[in-house]
Image (cartoon, rainbow, N blue to C red):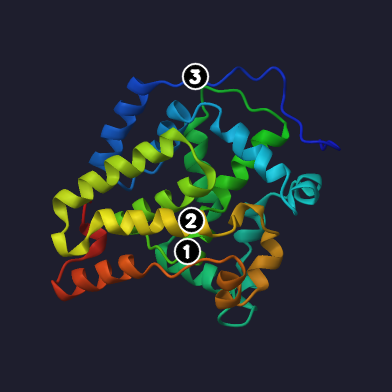
Amino acid sequence: MTHATPYIDPSRPRSRIKPFKAWGHMQKLLADKEDTSQVFHIIEALNGDAIVRDFKQFSASENGPSLLAKRSFLPTMLDDHAPLKDLPEGTVGHAYITFMKREGLSAAGLVAESETQREAQLDYDDDLQWYGNRLRDTHDLYHILSGYGRDALGEDALLAYTHSQHGGLGVNFIVFMGSRQIAKLAPPETRVKEVVAEARRNGKAASRIVDQDIEALLREPLDAARKRLNIAEPVIYKRAMKVMTELGIEPMLVAA
């Protein structure tokens, strides 16, 4: 079902902030950073109406109306690797499938994780639900374009980056708690706070990936796409990764 103007189901209840629920899920995430389903729970518990404000910004963007009219389901396209593999090396799409294969990930897998958070909730066939799914489904493209990896520091920095673009108390809480935990375990030379601060600056300065025509974006050369979107190199993060390598520390094991 599509609508000429952005449609939010009027039967949706107003989102309430649930700090105690968020704290419980945060403890589970700190115990196992690979349990990314906890991220969805925390965001749902703390973000309140932030997604509505974010959705309105998307709807008013240059591509928003046409993307809403199509309401494409991104996981189908993103998990169809054959066409992406045929793209020239150096394109966003080619970098994406290389990343997903190396990390053992799939867009469908992220959908399944998010669905565990929705078990007790109603789904709404409205544009806001579609937009929330789009934010979820573009997560790994944010990794590719921003330059932040899947190590604990990279994930935390990426959330700081996306918080600058989309807001939300839940995301900010995860960033704060994550960087606090990482700073306890990582060597001081990694300058965790500076990595996160740089990510916030980079996210604020860049155009939003979620507002882009993803099919067209995948065909762009990666360097050209970063330049067009004004995505700065994560210099301090890369320096932190170099420090860990020189000290013989595996970044993926920090805060694991």
Residue 101 drawn above or below residue 121: below
Label 3's element?
loop
Q: Which mark is residue 16?
A: 3
Local packing at callout 3 (Cα closer than 10 Å; few below 14, some 14-19, many 20+) is few
Q: Amino acid at mark 2?
A: Gly
Name the residue located 42 percent from the left edge and 40 percent from the top edge.
171
Marks 2 and 1: CB-CB under 8 Å?
yes
Left or right, 236 with respect to 232, comes to left
Left or right, 141 with respect to 154, comes to right
Label 1's element?
helix
Kindly identify which residue carries mark 2.
Answer: 203
Q: Amino acid at mark 3?
A: Arg
Residue 128 drawn above or below residue 210: above
Left or right, 189 with respect to 45, comes to left
Kindly report the distance in space between the C-alpha atoms of the residues bearing marks 2 and 1.
8 Å
Kindly report the distance in space between the C-alpha atoms of the residues bearing marks 3 and 1.
31 Å
Residue 9: x %, y % from top left = 72, 24
